[in-house]
Amino acid sequence: MSEWAVLSIAMAAACAVVLTITVINNRRIGENDDPTETPDVIEYMTMMIGVVYAIVLGLAIAGVWEARSAAQDSVRVEAQALHEVSARAEVYPPAVRTRIREDVDAYVTHVVDTEWRHMVERGSLTDKGDRLLQQVRRDVTDYVPKTDHEGQAYQPLVDQVAAADDARGARGQSIEATMPGVVWFGLITGALVTVGLIFTLQIRRTFRELLLAGLFSALIAFLLFLIWDFDAPFGRGISATADPFLALFPQARG
């Protein structure tokens, strides 16, 4: 059974139970019952729905912001690991050192100039980026250290390449949107219900009430837009950037 079917059954069952209890309870009310003595629950229900929806909105914003921060952190780790590879290669012979640094620069330039745009447009990493990083790995692992100093630098270099590869994988996993469709259904339905409940309070056409209703609706729309914008860590306005690469490899800016 799909999640949408489970959701529909659960919502229908909850509504059926509440309506059934309400109808049965109303039939048991005697003729001497005075409804004016019963507190009006409309305002209470409106307030509770607004509070619950505010909590849901807060959790959704926190979730997409955390995903965006994790995506930016993976970029920082990847850039720092590659910078360490380039810096620690200093102990190797000039020819080996130059080859490692050139391949690192080629990979970073490809990420900044080509792969970043490919992630935004197509939602995936590039095969060329995989090949360039594998070339860096081969440069590091294929060299046999000749001295104790080079031997001490070998394993840390291998570890840094592994860290860059792992961060690249995390970056690839962060491309897609993180909010599932069922959550968006709840957010949009909740927004319609919350805004619609304004009319249950007999809103009038005074300037003050219309202004508050408009601002409230605009706030809900802004928060939903904020969630939508954060939901694609690399693809929209407030997204993760390639600044860590550019800060550590300024030559890639061109």
Image (cartoon, rainbow, N blue to C red):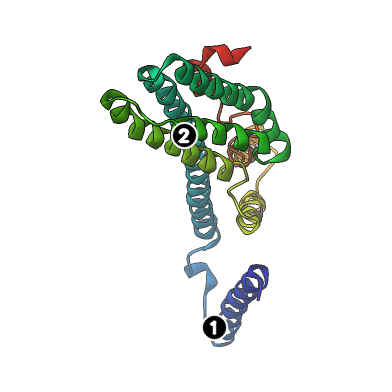
Going by the picture, which residue comes out furthest to the front? 146
From this view, report whether residue 174 is shown above or below residue 189.
above
Image quadrant assignment for residue 108 = top right
Residue visible at 60% across and 82% down in the picture: 20
* Residue type highlighted by circle 1: Asn
Residue toward you, 248 or 30: 248
Displayed quadrant of residue 97: top left
Where's residue 196, x and y in %?
67, 52
Q: Quadrant of the C terminus?
A: top right
**In this image, 107 relative to 94: left or right?**
right
Callout 2: helix, strand or loop? helix
User: Which element type, helix, strand or loop, lies under badge 1?
Assistant: helix
Q: Which mark is residue 218?
A: none
Is residue 17 depicted above or below 61 in this figure?
A: below
Q: Is residue 107 visible?
A: yes
Report the mark closest to the observer, 2 or 1: 2
Q: Residue 166: where, in percent of width, then height? A: 47, 41
Residue 121: name its quadrant: top right
The residue where tag 2 is placed is 142
Query: Extreme left residue here?
Result: 148
Q: Residue at x 62, y 57 (%)?
A: 186
- In the image, taking residue 197 as reference, residue 54 lies left or right, namely left
Residue depicted at x 47% and y 34%? 142
Quickly name the residue at label 1.
Answer: 25
* 2 or 1: tag closer to the N-terminus: 1
Pointers 2 and 1 in contact (C-beta within 8 Å): no
- Residue 190 drawn above or below residue 131: below
Residues 184 and 85: in front is 85
Instruction: Say which quadrant the N terminus sits in.
Output: bottom right
Residue occupying image coordinates x 52% and y 79%: 33
How far, Cα to Cα, is label 2 from label 1? 80 Å
Please provide percent x and percent y for residue 220: 61, 41
